[in-house]
Image (cartoon, grey):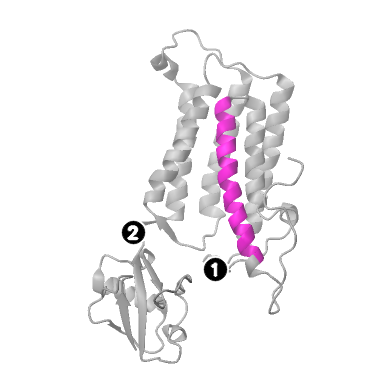
Amino acid sequence: MKVSVVSRSGREVVKGGVELNDSATVADLQKEIHRRTKKFYPSRQRLTLPLQPGSKEKPIALNYKKSLESYTEGNSANLTVVFKDLGPQVSYRTLFFWEYLGPLILYPIFYFFPVYRYFGYAGERIIHPVQTYALYYWCFHYFKRIMETFFVHRFSHATSPVSNVFRNCAYYWSFGSYIAYYVNHPLYTPVSDLQMKIGFAFGVLCQVSNFYCHILLRNLRSPDGNGGYQIPRGFLFNIVTCANYTTEIYQWLGFNIATQTIAGYVFLVVAAFIMTNWALAKHRRLKKLFDGKEGRPRYPRRWVILPPFL
């Protein structure tokens, strides 16, 4: 089988094409492209079938596990694929580790060290109990996130563009410093003892619930990350499509009830907006996949991300 590898403009990416046996898979083609080009390793490649001129349909992406013959439409001797360079890639575990490590390190700096002297405050600082509990809560959250990244989450996509590392780190590290600055400020005014206890108790309950949601999602995939899209069931997933996002939003609501800062609520609103968009996209995708046709189960009626009592 001869495979022609072209760019979207029609230029040959691999001169003269690639010769493979008839039983070769898409993964075999990716390895051969890498061998011939050196620069484009498999996770950097996106291969699709060519579209007809003027077509507005989305191109069909080649699954690395499938045989090339399954995409030839009867002409098993020749195949043309369109190559796109996804750019330098990094593993999702590396991406998540760095974005979570920043807040885990930066927040304690504002608590333990006299950084406020550099912001013009020279008076004595009194640490309130709520600031100490906020430190414990914050560090537990991001330490949990890092542990879940390495020991719980199973990723269907192996890599992400390296540019996402800088974007995500900017988001998490900036908000981490922004919130830490105000919660630990010497002029910070604590809430009542009762409000603090209610906020942290609610937040810890949501953190534990969030961890359980991640366990349920983990069990939908095999250890290598395969398993495709499935309908999550059990616990809060029987009420909302993305219970993991629901508990994530609520746990930050608990933190803000206990600490009561504008910075914390700004982060809550931004994070809720981002996760709501993710949840809406996943909800639409699951409803489209599980529409009850051709023997497939119908996706049950659920709230997308937040039940009506918020």
Quarter of the C terminus within the rendering: top right
Residue 196 appears in the rendering: yes
Q: Which residue is mark 2?
A: 87
Q: Is residue 235 above or below residue 112?
A: below
| 244 and 283: which is toward the camera | 283
Mark earlier in primary sequence (2, 1):
2
Q: In the image as oriented, which residue stretches furthest toward the left?
A: 15
The mark found on residue 39 in the picture is none
Secondary element under disc 1, as helix, strand or loop, is loop
The quadrant of the picture occupied by the N terminus is bottom left
Amino acid at circle 2: Gly
Is the residue marked by circle 1 packed among few (<14), some (14-19), or many (20+) residues within 10 Å? few
Could you tell me which residue is drawn at 41 percent across and 49 percent down? 164
**Location of residue 251 (image quadrant):** top right
Question: Label 2: how many residues lie within 10 Å, few (<14), some (14-19) or many (20+)?
Answer: some
- Seen from the viewer's position, the closer of residues 273 and 195 is 273
x, y percent for residue 74 = 45, 92
Callout 2: SS: loop
Q: Magenta region: which residues?
A: 262-287
